[in-house]
Amino acid sequence: MKENEYRASRLLRELGVPVRYQIAKPLEQGAMTVGQISAALGRSRTTISHHLHIHRAVDVVGYETKGRNVVYRLKASLVPGLLAPGFPPAITLAEASDNVDSIPGIDPDDYVLLEFDEPTNKPPIDYANIDNVFQLSGGHTWLDGFGEIGSALWNGPGDLLLVTLSTTAGPPTVAVGDTITPDGGTITDALGNPCVSQIEITGSFGEPTGVEESRARIARTLVFALSQSSPNPFYQETEIRYAIPVKSEVSLKVYDLTGRLVRTLVQEEVGTGVHAARWDGRDEADSPVPGGVYLYRLAAGDFAGTRKVILVR
């Protein structure tokens, strides 16, 4: 998108969808005066004049004097497409930031800021869908070694998404220079047009100085951790991932809400690394348990953590 079109799209976005389509749309049919636009839309001349002034500031419209009248027309040949209801939202910026802790490579406070050229539907983005919604080139992933991200937060209008990264059990492989490809369905504008535009990640996470430093950073990020099971809710089987920084005696058990033991998934010494256990919704006697909310608890070294999982029957 050329610079003037980009500036125009940002200003039009700030004006809001109704203004973007109502104030400028009539000019697709030809030059009009403020009075003619006012009559066509049933809005005051003051409102029309105010927004036309903003359109002029970003080269969306031009004007000329004909006799005693001032007429306005769309100035850029591609702007009509920008205003059309079928024009999809686009990612205009994907910028990596090393944030406060300027450690070479990805660290836990690093993030990627995504900017869209108009408000979106703000769908929830989390560890379960981010790799599908924003596919990365080169087989890279947004997820850390534990299969998680820090967070993904939208601003009010839904035109900015801040994705903070996590490094539990090792950093993600997302990198500056990666191309982001939206899935073409999850992110839409107010009219339901899907976001399909690709964009390259710019900015910097800081660069590791060598292989040994990279390995050392991964080792420092590995801590005791218990992941949310996936899928959750589940019907047949769910996977529970956990991280162990030093060889430890590990206990991973499932309980019902009364505190009764339902199933022991792990009870053994486990080495350093990220591990996974599966629960198939059965008890110690290998009998199916009723649907409902269950708790799974990890105890390892001085660490203890508990999470909920929902079984659907």
Image (cartoon, rainbow, N blue to C red):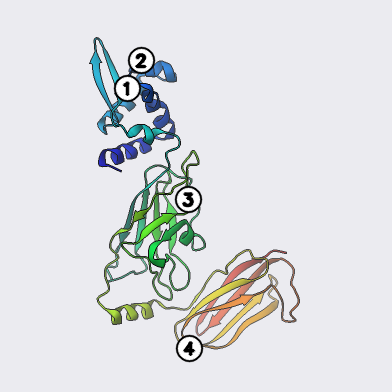
Q: Quadrant of residue 287?
A: bottom right
Establish if 247 lies above or below 88: below
Secondary element at tag 4: loop
Q: Classify 10 Å Cα crowding around label 4: few (below 14), some (14-19), many (20 and above).
A: few
At a point 46% along the width and 62% down the height, the residue shown is 131
Tag 2 and tag 3, C-beta contact below 8 Å? no
Mark 3 vs mark 4, CA separation in Å: 44 Å
Disc assigned to residue 49: 1
Please indicate whether residue 78 sits to the left or right of residue 149 in the image. left
CA distance separating discs 4 and 2:
78 Å
Local SS, label 2? helix
Near mark 1 (Cα within 10 A), the count class, few <14, some 14-19 or many ≥20, is some
Look at the numbered disc 3 and give the secondary structure of its residue: loop
Q: Which residue is depicted at the point 44% across and 31% down?
A: 18
Q: Residue at x 40, y 69 (%)?
A: 172
The image position of residue 196, as x and y in percent, is 43, 49
Disc nearer the start of the sequence (1/2): 2
Between disc 1 and disc 4, whose residue precedes? 1
Most extreme residue toward the top, as rendered? 67
Residue 184: numbered disc: 3
Q: Nearer the viewer, residue 72 or 45?
A: 72
Mark 2 residue type? Gly
Query: Mark 4 belongs to which amino acid?
Result: Lys
Q: Dot 2 surroundings within 10 Å: few (below 14), some, or many (20 or more)? A: some
Comparing labels 1 and 2, the label whose residue is closer to the camera:
2
Q: Is residue 55 above or below residue 224?
A: above
Which residue is tagged 2? 35
Locate the C terminus by quadrant.
bottom right
Amino acid under disc 3: Gly
